[in-house]
Each structure stands twice: as C-alpha cells, then as structure tokens.
Amino acid sequence: MREFSLPALYEVPSDGNLTDLIRRNAAQHPDVAVMSRKVAGVWTDVTATQFLAEVRAAAKGLIAAGIEPGDRVALMSRTRFEWVLLDFAIWSAGAVTVPVYETSSAEQVQWILGDSGAVAALVESDAHAEAVASVRDRLPGLRSVWQIDKGAVGELTAAGSGVSEETVDLRSASARADDPATIVYTSGTTGRPKGCVLTHRSFFAECGNVVERLRPLFRTGECSVLLFLPAAHVFGRLVEVASVMAPIKLGCVPDIKNLTDELAAFRPTLILGVPRVFEKVYNSARAKAQADGKGKIFDKAASTAIAYSRALGTAEGPSIGLKFKHKVFDRLVFSKLRAVLGGRGEYAISGGAPLGERLGHFYRGIGFTVLEGYGLTETCAATAFNPWDRQKIGTVGQPLPGSVVRIADDGEVLLHGEHLFQGYWNNEAATTEALADGWFHTGDIGTLDEDGYLAITGRKKEIIVTAGGKNVAPAVIEDRIRGHALVAECMVVGDGRPFVGALVTLDEEFLAHWAGDHGKPAGSTAQSLREDPELLAEVQRAVDEGNAAVSKAESVRKFRILASQFTEEAGHITPSLKLKRNVVAKDFADEIESLYQR
C-alpha cells in the first residue's frame, strides 16, 4: 500500500488557542484534580480551578514585565509542576514558549535563545542561570531572567498583582489557531538544531485526535499519567497538552533515578515512555529474579507471556494449556511486575525509537499493553500510533486521525495533516526542502500494510552502502542488539567497507550483575572485561539476535566492545537519546578501523 488516511475524530477550533482548555476545565470540571504536585514529599492534588488561578497569576507577572503578544520566552527546566504552569502562563500572556533542554550547554543555550529572539528566560537552577549569564553579552534581546528554584512563580505573581483580569483575558485570547504556540528546537543529530514552529492548531489536531482515538485511556476523574520524559521534548509536550485536553490528572517527575518509587506512590493508569524505560523494567526484574535464584522461573514466565500475546493475535487464541500456565505465572510473576509499574495501569504509549516485537509481546502478555507510536518534532509528536483496541505489534500503528501517510517511490515516509509544523524558524531553505507540495518529507524509510499500519525500517540518510553495494538500514539491527540487558548502545558501521561491523557499549548496572554471576573480579569494568571470552560470547548472542532480522549480507560480522559510554556530554547522543553518528564515527575512528584490520 502506498497511501493511507483516517478521518478526523476532533475538529480544531478555528479561532481558539490552548489557553481555552484550562478555562474550559475550570468551568466544566472545577473540582476535578487536573494536576498533582509534590508538597513536602507527598503528592497533592491541584484542581482545575486552582490551576487556572495560578496560571493567570503568573501570566500577569509576565505581562507586567513587558512581555508582548508573539514574544518568545525561553523555558529551561527539568520536568516539574512549574514547567506546565509556566508553559500555560506564557501562552496566557499571548507569548510563545521556547523550550530548552535542561542538559544544554551554554553554547546551545546561546544558539536557541539568540536564534529564536527570546526576550525573557525562565530557568530552574543555579547551573541554568549561570549558563544563560555566561552568554548574555551575546544576547542583546534578552531582557529578563527568572529562576524557578529562587521563587520565580511567586515573584511573577507578586509583580502581576496590579494587572487587571480584563488585561489577562485579552492576552489569553490574542493568539489564533494558526499562530505559533512554541518553537521546539530539534536535538540536532547533524549540524545546528533547527527551530520547529508548532502552532496552536498543531497541538489541537494532535492531542484532540490522540485523546479521542484512545478515549478509554483518558477518562476524566478516573485516569492519571505520570510524566517523566523531558518536558522540553515534543513527546513530553504531547503528554502535557493531551492530559489538560482530556482532562486527566498529570504528575511530573524531574528525576527518573527513583522512578519505581514514584510509580508506586502516584499509581498512574497510563505511562508514556521510551523503549529504554521498558527495557530497564524488564531487565531489572530479570536480574532480581536471577539474584534470588528464580531466574529460570522468570524466563519461563517471560516465554509464556510472549507466547500468550502471540496467540491473542490468532483466530484460535491461546490454548487451554497456555491459559493455565499464564494464570499460574500471573500470580507468581506478572502481578508483581504490574505492581512495579504502579499497579493500576493497563496501558503505556512508547515512542522515540522502536520497541521491538519481543518486548511488545512480553508486556501485552503480562497484562500491560505498550502501544507503540511514531513521530518527530515536526509532526508535533505522534503522527502514527497503535489504537488500544486494534494493536499490531511490530508496527508503529495507523496514521493520526485526520492525517495521511504516503510512501514515496524510494520508500520515504511522507506526511500530510493539520498537526504538522509551520516551518523552521529563520530557515526558509530547510523549510522548502522538508515541506514540498504540502507533504512533509520525514527522511525515514517505511512500509504500509494492507490495514494502513506503518513500519519504520530506517533513516534515509543513515543507509549504509557496503563496498559490495549492499544497502543496509542500521536501525533494524541496532534495535535488536540493544534489546539485550548488557547492551547500552550499539552503532552499526560499514559504509564503503567490505562488511558490516558494530560498536557496542555496555550497560554499567547490568555489567556489574553479570560480572558477579560469572565470577569476575569485584569492580570489573567494560575496560577490564572488553576482551573477556565469556563477555564476548554473551555480546555475540545479542549480535546474533540482531542478525536474525536481516539477510547475511546485512548482518554484523565483527563488533568491538567500547571501554566508555556514548554520552550527551561528549556529544555522542542527543537529549532524546538519538545517536550522532558522525560524532561517534570521528571519536571512535580507531576502534572502527580495528574492525577491518586483517
């Protein structure tokens, strides 16, 4: 199939903007908890009425500070209640939010604030404030900086006490559907980040259709979601706006180090994450079972879950024997895993990278269905996702209702719909290249099946062509290899080379477990074990799993375990965990060369 579309389930208001949502919630659901925040370590509900009042009070402060309609205001913070509050406050002042990743360097901060023309910045910490201060002499348009950790919200509220209700009403209503709501800078796997202009219409079309298609997951007064993704990332923004649109209760977690504790305390009904989160939960549970001497039981339970899920997709369904085994393991293993995920949820939505069929079937088999989706910053997050009632594991689902997916002659995925970005800020050439004849050229390679389900097979610019002329899409193999508990990252190489190779980094947490189980010296590291025959054999099993997905000519013949990690600080990965292949190739050129030495 070359093209597929679904009718819209939500009509975008012609003259509204996103602040309409919080006013509607306060009018229709005044006492419903739409947010929850930590107060003295305890989750405390915030009603729709309270949230609207706090947003308007902060918006008045921005207006008093001279923020005008259409002005750009930067927001640099971890994911927390104040992020959502200030995002809606910026919109309520008629301005445009420019998110900045909290891990950004001073140089990146300067580029984003300078390119967007931000007149003010809201930052979280001393480190963020110092980053802005260090480049402020190169940002002549930046007039004001407030720090959240030093009472920014209270400061704005006090400063805006003299601004009338009528003034904030007028400002809140000043933006129209086609006006910019935010400029989200791509994390930039190559070159400087580009600013994607997303309008209020983009978010209405995106979140309205997501909520309507997944309505059982967004029941007002019953459902809740815990946001631990970066709010600066467009996927995190989807969670924020969709939660407010539904509305359902939203909680924010700034640090995922204690995620399982937060899930247990908040008990969300819905989780949105990236594959690495779901891999970690699985791998941690398996490592704990092995440490307790129950590794074989866990592995049998996992095999049962996968078999049960696969059987659900057949006309016959699970056999009586499989149902019995599933019931036994549900009591012994699956119920405990669901408890780790909060105990109330039945669904999660995963994006950012492929989840893989194995994990997809595992989670559905334990009674916690992970719906895989696909999107980019330019598509305001999800442009395709699996519906709750018609999941097809191994695909990223059907198009967002109201949009069209087309596969070009060369396999590139093209998109059309109201949710698409308006263009790149200050970059007409890049906009013209990406948006041609009303279609957004994603740069991804994919296929559509007979039911309109999309599968992504690689990136157009990342296709490796070996010396023998074989085209190789690295993502297919990398995602399978990365699914092994020991593997942190994998990068396939081989452009212009006689065969395909791979660089592999090890997950430090699971390396310690593995080393202990295999009698290696305490404190063993990737550096000390990278040539260890047992470790090489274990990683080879991961590579064999990756190779099973491709032809022999595309398979990884040799790999190198690296002594260090791919890190954001070193520029190897983006804040959204995408590999910067050119940087990795440069920094590990000697390791790549060693793969091809005879």
Image (tube, helix red, strand yellow):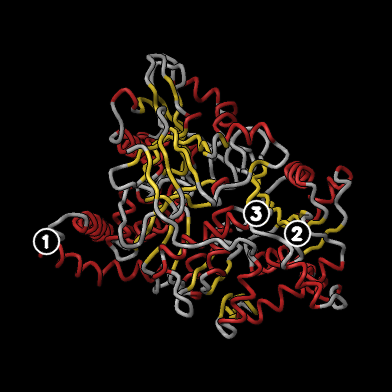
Residue occupying image coordinates x 72% and y 43%: 108
Residue occupying image coordinates x 44% and y 24%: 464
Mark 3 lies on a secondary structure that is: loop
Q: Which residue is mark 2?
A: 95
Farthest residue in the bottom direction? 31
Q: Earlier in the sequence, mark 2 or mark 3?
A: 2
Characterize the local packing of mark 1: few (<14), some (14-19) or many (20 or more) Cα atoms within 10 angstroms. Answer: few
Q: Amino acid at mark 2?
A: Ala
The CA span between labels 1 and 3 is 53 Å
Q: Which residue is mark 3?
A: 178
Q: Amino acid at mark 1?
A: Ser
The CA span between labels 1 and 2 is 58 Å
Question: Mark 1–mark 2 contact, CB under 8 Å?
Answer: no
Q: Earlier in the sequence, mark 1 or mark 2?
A: 2
Q: Amino acid at mark 3?
A: Asp
Front-lying residue, 69 or 595: 69
Count of numbered marks: 3
Asked if residue 534 can be seen in this view, the reply is: no
Q: Which residue is mark 1?
A: 319
Whether 407 is drawn above or below 306: the answer is above
